[in-house]
Amino acid sequence: AAPSPASPASPTPVLAAGAPSTDVSGVRMLAALSDSAALVALTPRGADGLTPGEEAPEVLRAEGGDLCVRYLAPLASVCLGEGGEMRLGRGPSGDREVELRAGRLVAALDPLPEGERFVVQTPAGSVSVVGTVFIVELDPSGEASVSVLEGTVEVRGRERDAPVRVSAGLGMQFGAAAPAPVISDAPALEWGRARAALGALWRDASVARVTRPEVDEDAAGELVLDGVSLGAAPLDMVVSPGSHALEWRAADGEVSRESLELSPGVARSLAPRSRVAVAAAPEVSDVGSRSPERARRPSIDALKRRARSARAARSWAEAAESYEELIRRYPRTPAAQNARVQLGELLRDRLGQPERALASYDDYIARGGDLIVEAHHGRILALRQLGRAAEERGAIERFLEQFPGSLVAGGLRARLDELRAAEKR
Protein backbone atom coordinates (compact mmCIF):
# COMPACT_ATOMS: atom_id res chain seq x y z
CA ALA A 1 0.00 0.00 0.00
CA ALA A 2 1.10 3.56 -0.60
CA PRO A 3 2.71 5.31 2.38
CA SER A 4 0.58 8.02 3.91
CA PRO A 5 1.59 11.91 3.72
CA ALA A 6 -0.35 14.98 4.73
CA SER A 7 8.03 22.29 1.50
CA PRO A 8 11.31 22.61 1.62
CA ALA A 9 12.99 23.74 4.80
CA SER A 10 13.75 27.41 5.28
CA PRO A 11 17.17 28.51 4.05
CA THR A 12 17.69 30.30 7.38
CA PRO A 13 20.32 28.24 9.27
CA VAL A 14 18.69 28.53 12.72
CA LEU A 15 15.17 27.15 13.02
CA ALA A 16 12.46 29.40 14.43
CA ALA A 17 12.21 29.52 18.21
CA GLY A 18 9.72 27.00 19.46
CA ALA A 19 9.93 24.80 16.37
CA PRO A 20 9.87 21.09 17.27
CA SER A 21 13.18 19.26 17.27
CA THR A 22 13.80 16.60 14.65
CA ASP A 23 15.37 13.40 15.96
CA VAL A 24 18.03 12.20 13.52
CA SER A 25 20.15 10.07 15.84
CA GLY A 26 21.56 7.10 13.97
CA VAL A 27 21.35 8.80 10.56
CA ARG A 28 24.30 8.88 8.18
CA MET A 29 24.49 11.93 5.93
CA LEU A 30 26.37 12.47 2.69
CA ALA A 31 26.69 15.80 0.87
CA ALA A 32 27.04 15.55 -2.92
CA LEU A 33 28.79 18.48 -4.58
CA SER A 34 28.59 17.34 -8.20
CA ASP A 35 27.27 14.38 -10.15
CA SER A 36 28.64 11.80 -7.73
CA ALA A 37 31.25 13.32 -5.40
CA ALA A 38 30.00 13.30 -1.83
CA LEU A 39 30.92 14.11 1.74
CA VAL A 40 29.96 12.35 4.92
CA ALA A 41 27.81 14.76 6.90
CA LEU A 42 26.42 12.83 9.86
CA THR A 43 27.50 9.33 10.79
CA PRO A 44 28.51 7.26 13.80
CA ARG A 45 32.29 7.79 13.80
CA GLY A 46 34.10 5.32 11.60
CA ALA A 47 30.95 3.82 10.08
CA ASP A 48 31.80 2.21 6.72
CA GLY A 49 35.22 3.86 6.88
CA LEU A 50 33.77 7.09 5.43
CA THR A 51 35.22 10.48 6.33
CA PRO A 52 34.26 14.04 5.30
CA GLY A 53 35.65 14.96 1.89
CA GLU A 54 35.64 11.41 0.58
CA GLU A 55 33.98 10.59 -2.73
CA ALA A 56 30.91 8.42 -2.37
CA PRO A 57 30.43 5.26 -4.42
CA GLU A 58 27.86 5.29 -7.20
CA VAL A 59 25.76 2.68 -5.41
CA LEU A 60 24.87 3.47 -1.81
CA ARG A 61 23.44 1.09 0.78
CA ALA A 62 21.92 2.19 4.09
CA GLU A 63 23.18 -0.67 6.24
CA GLY A 64 23.83 1.00 9.60
CA GLY A 65 20.92 3.42 9.68
CA ASP A 66 19.40 5.94 7.30
CA LEU A 67 21.68 7.58 4.74
CA CYS A 68 21.26 10.93 2.98
CA VAL A 69 22.84 12.70 0.01
CA ARG A 70 22.94 16.43 -0.75
CA TYR A 71 23.21 17.95 -4.22
CA LEU A 72 23.94 21.64 -4.78
CA ALA A 73 22.87 24.40 -7.22
CA PRO A 74 19.94 23.96 -6.78
CA LEU A 75 19.83 22.15 -3.45
CA ALA A 76 18.38 18.65 -3.28
CA SER A 77 18.44 16.29 -0.31
CA VAL A 78 17.72 12.57 -0.76
CA CYS A 79 17.48 10.30 2.29
CA LEU A 80 17.48 6.52 1.98
CA GLY A 81 15.84 4.46 4.72
CA GLU A 82 17.79 1.79 6.61
CA GLY A 83 18.11 -1.39 4.57
CA GLY A 84 17.61 0.46 1.29
CA GLU A 85 19.82 0.72 -1.79
CA MET A 86 20.07 3.44 -4.46
CA ARG A 87 22.28 4.39 -7.38
CA LEU A 88 23.19 8.01 -8.20
CA GLY A 89 23.50 9.09 -11.81
CA ARG A 90 22.24 11.21 -14.69
CA GLY A 91 19.43 10.47 -17.13
CA PRO A 92 19.76 10.56 -20.95
CA SER A 93 18.90 14.28 -21.01
CA GLY A 94 21.32 15.11 -18.19
CA ASP A 95 18.70 15.28 -15.43
CA ARG A 96 19.72 14.22 -11.93
CA GLU A 97 18.53 10.67 -11.47
CA VAL A 98 18.32 8.30 -8.52
CA GLU A 99 17.57 4.62 -9.08
CA LEU A 100 15.82 3.15 -6.03
CA ARG A 101 16.73 -0.52 -5.91
CA ALA A 102 15.34 -1.41 -2.49
CA GLY A 103 13.60 0.24 0.45
CA ARG A 104 12.31 3.80 0.62
CA LEU A 105 13.62 7.31 0.09
CA VAL A 106 12.43 10.86 0.64
CA ALA A 107 13.59 13.70 -1.62
CA ALA A 108 13.34 17.44 -0.86
CA LEU A 109 14.21 19.77 -3.73
CA ASP A 110 14.61 23.49 -4.20
CA PRO A 111 12.95 24.75 -7.42
CA LEU A 112 14.74 23.57 -10.57
CA PRO A 113 15.14 25.69 -13.71
CA GLU A 114 12.41 25.21 -16.32
CA GLY A 115 13.13 22.21 -18.50
CA GLU A 116 15.09 20.35 -15.80
CA ARG A 117 13.76 17.42 -13.82
CA PHE A 118 14.81 15.33 -10.85
CA VAL A 119 13.92 11.69 -11.56
CA VAL A 120 13.56 8.68 -9.27
CA GLN A 121 13.54 5.38 -11.18
CA THR A 122 12.14 2.12 -9.80
CA PRO A 123 11.40 -1.24 -11.45
CA ALA A 124 7.72 -0.25 -11.37
CA GLY A 125 8.14 3.16 -13.03
CA SER A 126 9.48 6.64 -12.40
CA VAL A 127 8.73 9.89 -10.55
CA SER A 128 9.66 13.23 -12.13
CA VAL A 129 9.66 16.61 -10.32
CA VAL A 130 10.87 20.21 -10.60
CA GLY A 131 10.77 21.19 -6.91
CA THR A 132 8.88 19.40 -4.15
CA VAL A 133 9.05 16.93 -1.24
CA PHE A 134 7.99 13.34 -1.82
CA ILE A 135 8.51 9.74 -0.65
CA VAL A 136 8.98 6.66 -2.85
CA GLU A 137 8.71 3.12 -1.44
CA LEU A 138 9.67 -0.10 -3.19
CA ASP A 139 8.49 -3.37 -1.65
CA PRO A 140 10.28 -6.72 -2.06
CA SER A 141 7.87 -7.79 -4.81
CA GLY A 142 8.93 -4.85 -6.98
CA GLU A 143 5.76 -2.82 -6.52
CA ALA A 144 6.31 0.88 -5.81
CA SER A 145 4.28 3.78 -4.43
CA VAL A 146 4.73 7.53 -4.04
CA SER A 147 3.41 9.99 -1.44
CA VAL A 148 3.70 13.75 -1.93
CA LEU A 149 4.34 16.01 1.06
CA GLU A 150 4.60 19.22 -0.95
CA GLY A 151 4.33 20.38 -4.54
CA THR A 152 3.44 18.13 -7.47
CA VAL A 153 5.12 15.12 -9.09
CA GLU A 154 4.53 13.16 -12.30
CA VAL A 155 4.30 9.38 -11.94
CA ARG A 156 4.83 7.13 -14.96
CA GLY A 157 4.30 3.36 -14.81
CA ARG A 158 6.64 0.75 -16.23
CA GLU A 159 4.52 0.49 -19.38
CA ARG A 160 5.46 4.12 -20.19
CA ASP A 161 1.79 5.11 -20.17
CA ALA A 162 0.75 8.75 -19.78
CA PRO A 163 2.12 10.36 -16.61
CA VAL A 164 -0.24 10.97 -13.68
CA ARG A 165 0.15 14.20 -11.69
CA VAL A 166 0.09 13.68 -7.92
CA SER A 167 -0.17 16.71 -5.63
CA ALA A 168 0.53 17.32 -1.93
CA GLY A 169 -1.58 15.21 0.42
CA LEU A 170 -2.05 12.47 -2.19
CA GLY A 171 -0.29 9.20 -2.98
CA MET A 172 -0.62 6.38 -5.46
CA GLN A 173 0.61 2.94 -6.35
CA PHE A 174 2.56 2.84 -9.61
CA GLY A 175 0.19 1.64 -12.31
CA ALA A 176 -2.95 2.74 -10.45
CA ALA A 177 -5.58 4.74 -12.31
CA ALA A 178 -5.55 7.75 -9.99
CA PRO A 179 -4.01 9.06 -6.76
CA ALA A 180 -5.81 8.90 -3.41
CA PRO A 181 -5.60 10.84 -0.12
CA VAL A 182 -2.97 9.67 2.35
CA ILE A 183 -2.89 9.60 6.15
CA SER A 184 -0.85 12.58 7.32
CA ASP A 185 0.35 11.05 10.62
CA ALA A 186 1.40 7.65 9.23
CA PRO A 187 4.89 6.52 10.36
CA ALA A 188 6.30 6.62 6.81
CA LEU A 189 5.22 10.24 6.45
CA GLU A 190 6.59 11.22 9.85
CA TRP A 191 9.91 9.64 8.86
CA GLY A 192 9.90 11.51 5.56
CA ARG A 193 9.18 14.88 7.13
CA ALA A 194 11.96 14.43 9.69
CA ARG A 195 14.55 13.50 7.06
CA ALA A 196 13.48 16.21 4.61
CA ALA A 197 13.86 18.91 7.28
CA LEU A 198 17.61 18.26 7.58
CA GLY A 199 18.53 20.33 4.53
CA ALA A 200 18.63 23.56 6.54
CA LEU A 201 21.81 22.38 8.26
CA TRP A 202 23.98 22.32 5.12
CA ARG A 203 22.63 24.57 2.38
CA ASP A 204 25.96 26.19 1.51
CA ALA A 205 28.51 24.85 -1.01
CA SER A 206 31.36 25.39 1.45
CA VAL A 207 31.01 23.51 4.70
CA ALA A 208 32.54 23.26 8.14
CA ARG A 209 32.97 20.01 10.02
CA VAL A 210 31.63 19.22 13.48
CA THR A 211 32.69 16.09 15.37
CA ARG A 212 32.03 14.69 18.80
CA PRO A 213 34.29 11.92 20.10
CA GLU A 214 33.25 8.92 22.15
CA VAL A 215 31.35 9.92 25.28
CA ASP A 216 31.23 8.06 28.60
CA GLU A 217 28.25 7.64 30.91
CA ASP A 218 29.15 10.72 32.93
CA ALA A 219 28.94 12.84 29.77
CA ALA A 220 25.72 11.31 28.49
CA GLY A 221 23.22 13.73 27.06
CA GLU A 222 21.67 15.09 23.89
CA LEU A 223 23.30 17.48 21.42
CA VAL A 224 20.90 19.79 19.53
CA LEU A 225 22.04 21.92 16.59
CA ASP A 226 19.63 24.54 15.19
CA GLY A 227 16.71 22.71 16.80
CA VAL A 228 17.73 19.37 15.25
CA SER A 229 18.47 16.64 17.79
CA LEU A 230 21.69 14.78 16.99
CA GLY A 231 21.23 12.28 19.81
CA ALA A 232 23.83 11.11 22.33
CA ALA A 233 26.00 8.95 20.05
CA PRO A 234 29.38 10.08 18.70
CA LEU A 235 28.99 11.91 15.41
CA ASP A 236 30.88 13.31 12.44
CA MET A 237 28.99 15.75 10.24
CA VAL A 238 29.27 18.76 7.95
CA VAL A 239 27.18 21.91 8.28
CA SER A 240 26.98 25.22 6.47
CA PRO A 241 29.40 27.86 7.75
CA GLY A 242 28.08 30.75 9.81
CA SER A 243 26.27 31.04 13.13
CA HIS A 244 24.49 28.02 14.60
CA ALA A 245 22.53 27.57 17.84
CA LEU A 246 24.06 24.75 19.89
CA GLU A 247 22.46 23.13 22.95
CA TRP A 248 23.81 20.42 25.25
CA ARG A 249 21.01 18.71 27.21
CA ALA A 250 22.64 16.73 30.00
CA ALA A 251 21.13 13.56 31.42
CA ASP A 252 20.45 15.36 34.72
CA GLY A 253 18.21 17.86 32.91
CA GLU A 254 20.66 20.76 32.84
CA VAL A 255 20.77 22.63 29.52
CA SER A 256 23.71 24.72 28.32
CA ARG A 257 23.55 26.89 25.20
CA GLU A 258 26.00 28.71 23.00
CA SER A 259 26.29 30.25 19.56
CA LEU A 260 28.64 28.19 17.40
CA GLU A 261 30.50 30.19 14.74
CA LEU A 262 31.86 28.03 11.91
CA SER A 263 34.17 29.07 9.08
CA PRO A 264 34.46 27.18 5.77
CA GLY A 265 36.94 24.34 5.99
CA VAL A 266 37.27 24.45 9.79
CA ALA A 267 36.66 21.39 11.95
CA ARG A 268 35.34 21.68 15.50
CA SER A 269 35.41 18.87 18.01
CA LEU A 270 32.58 19.28 20.49
CA ALA A 271 32.63 18.19 24.11
CA PRO A 272 29.94 18.54 26.81
CA ARG A 273 29.63 21.86 28.63
CA SER A 274 30.76 23.80 25.54
CA ARG A 275 34.40 22.70 25.66
CA VAL A 276 35.35 23.28 22.01
CA ALA A 277 38.65 22.56 20.28
CA VAL A 278 39.35 23.83 16.75
CA ALA A 279 41.48 21.98 14.20
CA ALA A 280 42.27 22.56 10.54
CA ALA A 281 40.33 20.61 7.95
CA PRO A 282 40.45 20.71 4.15
CA GLU A 283 37.99 23.19 2.73
CA VAL A 284 35.37 21.94 0.34
CA SER A 285 36.00 23.44 -3.06
CA ASP A 286 33.24 25.45 -4.67
CA VAL A 287 31.40 23.81 -7.53
CA GLY A 288 32.42 25.32 -10.81
CA SER A 289 34.55 28.40 -11.34
CA ARG A 290 33.97 29.78 -14.77
CA SER A 291 31.25 32.13 -15.97
CA PRO A 292 29.86 31.39 -19.45
CA GLU A 293 30.29 33.91 -22.22
CA ARG A 294 27.43 36.29 -22.68
CA ALA A 295 25.77 35.78 -26.02
CA ARG A 296 24.53 38.87 -27.85
CA ARG A 297 21.01 37.50 -28.14
CA PRO A 298 20.92 34.59 -25.70
CA SER A 299 18.30 31.88 -26.01
CA ILE A 300 16.26 30.60 -23.09
CA ASP A 301 18.57 27.60 -22.77
CA ALA A 302 21.67 29.81 -22.87
CA LEU A 303 20.29 32.02 -20.09
CA LYS A 304 19.42 29.00 -17.96
CA ARG A 305 22.91 27.58 -18.45
CA ARG A 306 24.44 30.93 -17.53
CA ALA A 307 22.35 31.11 -14.35
CA ARG A 308 23.26 27.53 -13.37
CA SER A 309 26.97 28.13 -13.93
CA ALA A 310 26.88 31.36 -11.96
CA ARG A 311 25.09 29.69 -9.04
CA ALA A 312 27.55 26.80 -9.05
CA ALA A 313 30.42 29.32 -8.95
CA ARG A 314 28.63 31.22 -6.16
CA SER A 315 28.41 34.31 -8.38
CA TRP A 316 25.03 35.27 -6.97
CA ALA A 317 24.73 38.69 -8.63
CA GLU A 318 25.49 37.22 -12.06
CA ALA A 319 22.95 34.45 -11.52
CA ALA A 320 20.31 37.04 -10.58
CA GLU A 321 21.14 39.07 -13.69
CA SER A 322 20.66 35.96 -15.84
CA TYR A 323 17.25 35.26 -14.32
CA GLU A 324 16.25 38.90 -14.75
CA GLU A 325 17.30 38.84 -18.40
CA LEU A 326 15.37 35.60 -18.94
CA ILE A 327 12.23 37.16 -17.42
CA ARG A 328 12.67 40.38 -19.40
CA ARG A 329 13.27 38.71 -22.78
CA TYR A 330 10.79 35.82 -22.45
CA PRO A 331 8.23 37.01 -19.85
CA ARG A 332 5.37 34.63 -20.73
CA THR A 333 7.35 31.38 -20.92
CA PRO A 334 7.37 28.63 -18.26
CA ALA A 335 11.12 29.21 -17.91
CA ALA A 336 10.55 32.83 -16.94
CA GLN A 337 7.82 31.86 -14.48
CA ASN A 338 10.09 29.42 -12.61
CA ALA A 339 12.91 31.98 -12.76
CA ARG A 340 10.78 34.39 -10.71
CA VAL A 341 10.98 32.05 -7.70
CA GLN A 342 14.69 31.39 -8.21
CA LEU A 343 15.35 35.12 -8.54
CA GLY A 344 13.39 35.80 -5.36
CA GLU A 345 15.48 33.22 -3.48
CA LEU A 346 18.75 34.82 -4.64
CA LEU A 347 17.63 38.37 -3.88
CA ARG A 348 16.42 37.42 -0.41
CA ASP A 349 18.92 34.81 0.71
CA ARG A 350 22.13 35.81 -1.07
CA LEU A 351 21.97 39.47 -2.10
CA GLY A 352 20.16 41.07 0.85
CA GLN A 353 17.42 42.66 -1.27
CA PRO A 354 14.15 41.49 0.31
CA GLU A 355 12.06 44.28 -1.27
CA ARG A 356 12.96 43.13 -4.77
CA ALA A 357 12.55 39.51 -3.72
CA LEU A 358 9.03 40.28 -2.51
CA ALA A 359 8.13 41.76 -5.89
CA SER A 360 9.47 38.67 -7.67
CA TYR A 361 7.45 36.31 -5.46
CA ASP A 362 4.31 38.41 -5.93
CA ASP A 363 4.84 38.29 -9.68
CA TYR A 364 4.96 34.49 -9.57
CA ILE A 365 1.95 34.17 -7.25
CA ALA A 366 -0.16 36.36 -9.54
CA ARG A 367 0.45 33.87 -12.38
CA GLY A 368 0.46 30.62 -10.37
CA GLY A 369 2.34 27.37 -10.99
CA ASP A 370 3.79 24.23 -9.39
CA LEU A 371 6.14 26.28 -7.17
CA ILE A 372 3.32 28.21 -5.50
CA VAL A 373 4.14 26.87 -2.01
CA GLU A 374 7.78 27.90 -2.35
CA ALA A 375 6.73 31.34 -3.60
CA HIS A 376 4.39 31.95 -0.66
CA HIS A 377 7.02 30.79 1.83
CA GLY A 378 9.67 32.98 0.23
CA ARG A 379 7.28 35.91 0.43
CA ILE A 380 6.86 35.37 4.18
CA LEU A 381 10.64 35.33 4.69
CA ALA A 382 11.03 38.51 2.65
CA LEU A 383 8.41 40.29 4.76
CA ARG A 384 10.24 39.13 7.90
CA GLN A 385 13.52 40.56 6.61
CA LEU A 386 11.76 43.86 5.88
CA GLY A 387 10.37 44.02 9.41
CA ARG A 388 6.78 44.25 8.18
CA ALA A 389 5.36 42.20 11.05
CA ALA A 390 1.65 42.80 10.44
CA GLU A 391 1.92 41.76 6.79
CA GLU A 392 4.07 38.78 7.75
CA ARG A 393 1.46 37.64 10.27
CA GLY A 394 -1.29 37.84 7.65
CA ALA A 395 0.82 35.99 5.10
CA ILE A 396 1.56 33.21 7.60
CA GLU A 397 -2.11 32.85 8.48
CA ARG A 398 -3.03 32.51 4.81
CA PHE A 399 -0.18 30.04 4.22
CA LEU A 400 -1.32 27.79 7.08
CA GLU A 401 -4.88 27.83 5.75
CA GLN A 402 -3.76 26.84 2.25
CA PHE A 403 -0.84 24.50 3.04
CA PRO A 404 -1.32 23.08 6.57
CA GLY A 405 0.71 19.94 5.83
CA SER A 406 3.82 21.78 4.60
CA LEU A 407 7.16 20.88 6.18
CA VAL A 408 7.63 24.52 7.20
CA ALA A 409 4.17 24.77 8.82
CA GLY A 410 5.47 23.92 12.32
CA GLY A 411 8.06 26.68 12.26
CA LEU A 412 5.54 29.14 10.85
CA ARG A 413 3.04 28.35 13.60
CA ALA A 414 5.74 29.08 16.19
CA ARG A 415 6.56 32.34 14.43
CA LEU A 416 2.87 33.25 14.31
CA ASP A 417 2.65 32.77 18.08
CA GLU A 418 5.63 35.12 18.50
CA LEU A 419 4.04 37.79 16.33
CA ARG A 420 0.70 37.57 18.13
CA ALA A 421 2.40 37.76 21.53
CA ALA A 422 4.37 40.82 20.40
CA GLU A 423 1.16 42.56 19.31
CA LYS A 424 -0.29 42.16 22.81
CA ARG A 425 2.66 43.81 24.53
Image: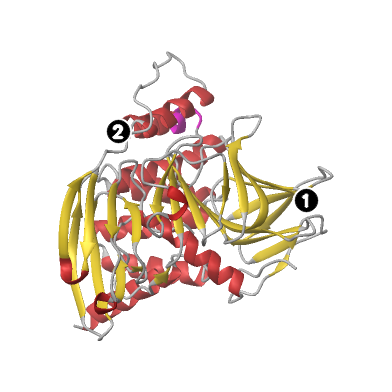
Q: Nearer the viewer, residue 11 or 87?
A: 87
Question: Residue 44 appears at what percent x and percent y?
Answer: 40, 60
Q: Is residue 6 visible?
A: no
Badge 1 amino acid: Ala
Q: Is residue 153 above or below residue 197?
A: above
Determine if residue 291 is in view: yes
**Residue at position x 40%, y 29% in the image:** 322
Mark 2–mark 1 distance (CA, rounded to whole Å)? 43 Å
Closer to the camera, 245 or 417? 245
Q: Which residues are magenta?
A: 326-330
**How many marks can you see?**
2
Q: Residues within 10 Å of mark 2 (few under 14, many from 20)?
A: some
* Residue at the spot of label 2: 317
Closer to the chain start, of discs 2 and 1, is 1
Image location of residue 214, percent across then percent down: 30, 65
Quadrant of the rendered image containing residue 135: bottom right
Q: Is residue 194 left or right of residue 84?
A: left
Q: Residue furthest top?
A: 296
**Prevailing SS of the magenta stretch:** helix
- In the foreground, 362 or 71: 71
Q: Is residue 227 left or right of residue 119?
A: left
Query: The disc labelled 2 sits on which kind of residue?
Result: Ala
Label 2 residue SS: helix
- Residue 20 percent coordinates (x, y): 38, 74
For label 1, the residue is: 124
Q: Quick check: 171 left or right of 391?
A: right
Residue 383: x and y in percent read 31, 59
Note whether 252 is above or below 52 in the view shown. below
Q: Is residue 335 magenta?
A: no
User: In this rendering, which labeled residue sits more in front, label 2 or label 1?
Assistant: 1
